[in-house]
Amino acid sequence: MSILAAIAVLGILIVVHELGHFAAARLQGIHVNRFSIGFGPILLKYQGPQTEYALRAFPLGGFVGFPDDDPDCNIPADDPNLLRNRPILDRAIVISAGVIANLIFAYFVLVTQASFVGIYTPTQPGVLVPQVVQNFPADQAGIKAGDIILGVNDQELGMSLDVRDQFQEIIQNSANQSVNLKIKRDQEIVNLTVIPQGDPEGKGKIGVSLDFNGEFIRNRLSITEAVNFGNNEFQRLTRLTVQGFWQLISNFQETASQVSGPVKIVEYGATIAQKDAGSLFGFAALISINLAIINILPLPALDGGQLVFILIEGLLGKPLPLKLQEGIMQTGLVLLLGLGMFLIVKDTLNLAVFQDLISR
């Protein structure tokens, strides 16, 4: 059941994305003839008055089809409600609507979780230091495993979910500068000074792992508190996602092995659902934000790639030749599907169940 729950979450996010495109087109009166979840052979379909709705074999995404690309379309080529005949702004709205839908969905999922399910909050202030790396600044300053950092530079660390991020941000912004720490060690309060070591990017590091302090309890928030939580958590997840993609791009050789596909995502989701179904809300929000950022990347076959074509058209005053656009998009689609299949095979081979089978 936990696997089905994780698959359902991914399916909902794909539907939300495609509904964004679909709604943006239909609300502007633009013709839409296909709404598909997945790629490849059709498993199920329903033919509506204007649009064919289909579920396809490979659940690696979906698409909204327009009659502009259908050679059997009986709509006149000069119909103003064909997507290609609409102004640049109208087309840009349709193309970007999937990304916007995923971001809006993520925000409302977070608010809903806080209001109706509740969020886990730590019961004790500060951050716990489970491990200290030898010969790093923290070790040299006298910080020990098991210490609880209660304050930094006269700023108290509370019990919020972003308390670790607050501490990390201060350390990262204090490379080669003295940082005063208020530490609880057993029943004693200790004041120490540490000088974060600057890395090649100029960010400070002290060589510790961090965790929340104390137990967690689930609390349901009022609407006002839930909206505030949604704002803060949405910004935090978006910032972490963007940072993750930037690290992947800037250090591709080191981080490429960490890239995962749909199978691994389902595995993570299933693990979360098995431990605590309520946490699937946060999982859904995080994956929805990831889908939005992936799709806005300026790569062929993604929404960002199509927006690049529109930007070029706006700058040149005319679109690129249709055959050139189709060639780029088809090549990008093949590469995208190939990458998706590679990640599926890679993640499947790494599954614990599969490893257990081949080790017998």
Image (cartoon, helix red, strand yellow):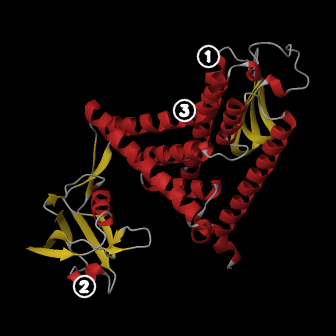
Front tag of 3 and 2: 2
First in residue order: circle 3 vs circle 2: 3
Q: Badge 2 is on which residue?
A: 140
Q: What type is the residue that disc 1 sits on?
A: Leu
Q: How many neighbours does mark 2 have within 10 angstroms: few (below 14), some (14-19), or many (20 or more)?
A: some
Residue lying furthest right in this view? 72
Q: Is residue 344 above or below residue 204?
A: above
Asked whether, in this view, residue 116 is left or right of residue 184, the answer is right
Q: Is residue 231 above or below residue 217?
A: above
Q: Badge 1 is on which residue?
A: 27
The Cα atoms of the two marked residues, 1 and 2, are separated by 63 Å
Front tag of 1 and 2: 2
Identify which residue is drawn at 30% across, 52% down. 161
Q: Badge 3 is on which residue?
A: 101
Residue 256 in percent (x, y) is at 62, 66
Q: Quadrant of residue 221?
A: top left
Q: Which mark is residue 314?
A: none
Identify which residue is drawn at 62% across, 70% down. 253
**Regarding mark 1 in the picture, which secondary structure is present there?**
helix
Q: What type is the residue that disc 3 sits on?
A: Ala
Residue 230 in percent (x, y) is at 36, 39
The Cα atoms of the two marked residues, 3 and 1, are separated by 14 Å
First in residue order: circle 3 vs circle 1: 1
Q: What type is the residue that disc 2 sits on?
A: Gln
Q: Quadrant of the C terminus?
A: bottom right
Identify which residue is drawn at 80% across, 12% down. 79
Q: How many neighbours does mark 3 have within 10 angstroms: few (below 14), some (14-19), or many (20 or more)?
A: many
Q: Quadrant of residue 196?
A: bottom left
**Regarding mark 3 in the picture, which secondary structure is present there?**
helix
Residue 1 in percent (x, y) is at 56, 49
Asked whether, in this view, residue 349 is left or right of residue 16, the answer is right
